[in-house]
Image (cartoon, rainbow, N blue to C red):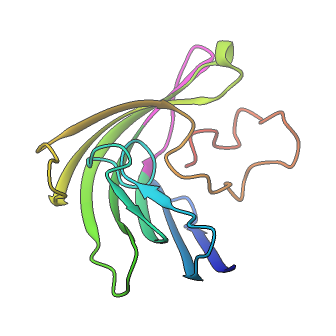
């Protein structure tokens, strides 16, 4: 079975609003003898579309977020995000990407081992069949798994390391 995958991530330098995070993922399976499938939609790569609504041998995904600087409240951090997601899971090229845009809230609580808790509200721009005009998502961890360039290699994240990803 031949399968090819590429993931590219870019973090902007911090500026007065926060930081821009861009992430892209491509999975191509030209000879898919094992019938492996990828899904897209829901709380991760295509917020605003129903969970796992897109299914296919190939995957194309693009995510961009503007993550705000954190507001420190006691031992917690609160932040926000504006996002744009686009992508498709499909069997035959060319892809026909769907897209969403939205807004989210982020919280890092020391009681939860400094994991990010997020609430996202996504609005489909190009909708899939059966998609509602708005999608609400609550999840732990960021929507896509790019690692911040400021994050240390260890498990302990210093208070000024940008646990919210900004």
Displayed quadrant of residue 118: top left
**Residue 72 location, x and y as percent?**
54, 25
Q: Is residue 35 left or right of 80 when viewed as pictured?
A: right
Tell me the magenta residue range.
67-79
Residue at (16% x, 61% y) in the render: 125
Q: Quadrant of residue 148?
A: bottom right
Q: Main secondary structure of the magenta part?
A: strand
Q: Could you tell me which residue is drawn at 25 percent across and 55 percent down?
A: 101
Counting from the top left corner in percent of width and height, residue 90 is at: 38, 72
In the displayed structure, 82 sits above or below 87; it is above
| Left or right of 66 on screen, residue 128 | left
Out of 120 and 105, give the one closest to the viewer. 120
Residue 68 x %, y %: 44, 46
Residue 23 drawn above or below residue 151: below
Residue 137 is one of the magenta-drawn residues: no
Q: Residue furthest right?
A: 154
Task: Locate residue 4: give its quadrant.
Answer: bottom right
User: Residue at position x 13%, y 42% from top?
Assistant: 132
- Of the 4 image quadrants, the one containing the N terminus is bottom right
């Amino acid at each position: 079975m031949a399968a090819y995958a590429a993931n590219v991530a870019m973090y902007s330098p911090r500026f007065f609003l926060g930081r821009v995070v861009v992430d892209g993922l491509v999975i191509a399976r030209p000879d898919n003898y094992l019938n492996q499938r990828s899904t897209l939609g829901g709380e991760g790569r295509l917020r605003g579309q129903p969970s796992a609504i897109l299914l296919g041998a190939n995957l194309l995904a693009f995510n961009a977020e503007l993550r705000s600087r954190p507001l420190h409240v006691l031992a917690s951090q609160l932040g926000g995000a504006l996002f744009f997601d686009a992508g498709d899971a499909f069997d035959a090229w060319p892809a026909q990407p769907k897209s969403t845009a939205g807004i989210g809230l982020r919280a890092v609580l020391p009681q939860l081992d400094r994991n990010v808790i997020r609430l996202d509200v996504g609005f489909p721009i190009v909708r899939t069949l059966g998609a509602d005009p708005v999608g609400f998502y609550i999840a732990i961890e960021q929507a896509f798994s790019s690692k911040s360039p400021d994050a240390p290699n260890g498990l302990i994240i210093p208070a000024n390391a940008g646990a919210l990803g900004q």
